Image: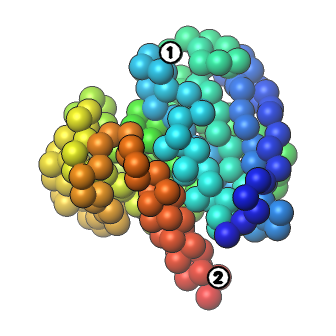
Amino acid sequence: MTARHPAVERLFIDGPAGPVEALLERPARPVPDRVAVCCHPHPLFGGTMQNKVVHALARAALDCGVPSIRFNFRGVGGSQGAYDNGIGETADALAVADWAAEALGAGRLWAMGFSFGSFVAYGLALSRRADRLVTVAPPVQRFDFSTLAIPACPWLVVQGDNDELVNHGSVLEWTRALDPAPRVSLFQGADHFFHGRITELREVVGQWLKDDRIADSG
């Protein structure tokens, strides 16, 4: 595990619609050449980079020694612009990842997202050939993932079977039809926001990331 309180830096990154507000967290001994970009839920329904699931994803990366960046999509918090149906938000994520590649020397990207942010993280992973992809409660009924290519990187899908917003059956049907299929972690009894299960979520995602990282280094 990394330090309980990693160094946190508030940033404004140049984005296609104006400055993008972000939080960069660094572990005491960061793994070189890697960064996790974490994408938040739907901006029109209260989603921000402070969401607790997104925070758990960022901390899971930090537990593996990888710096994490959470950021607000356009029109949220201090980020300029207006909601753009996932297209502009994906452009925001690309700008954040490109900034990290240049400013941090992070050539290996972990794309991570929750709900709407899963759709954005998916597009980010495809566009920047991510090393890892984590999608929590991907909204397959609202956004058509089936029209997109299958990511070539290791990919984890996390879904609660008591999710009131994303039908877990639809998620399982979608993932089972993919070749290669992602790793799927189904949380029994978990709702959309993983109430009471955040620590478990962080541990499951962190262990998956850590296991794959060790396999890579070997």
Image coordinates for residue 106, horizontal then vertical, percent: 75, 56
Q: Which residue is drawn at 68% across and 44% down?
A: 69
Give residue 203's mark: none
Sequence-first tag of 2 and 1: 1
Q: Which residue, given by chain and number where applicable, does mark 2 sit on?
A: 217
Image-based side of 165 in relation to 69, left or right = left
The image quarter containing residue 86 is: top left
Q: Which residue, given by chain and number where applicable, does mark 1 sit on?
A: 83
The quadrant of the picture occupied by the C terminus is bottom right
- The residue lying furthest to the top in this view is 82
Name the residue type under label 1.
Tyr
Q: Residue at x 65, y 33 (%)?
A: 71
Image-based side of 200 in relation to 64, left or right = left
In this rendering, the answer to whether 207 lies above or below 66 is below
Q: Which of 19 and 180 is in front in this view?
A: 19
Q: Is residue 144 visible?
A: no
Image coordinates for residue 97, horizontal then vertical, percent: 67, 43
Image-based side of 146 in relation to 19, left or right = left
SS type, badge 2? helix
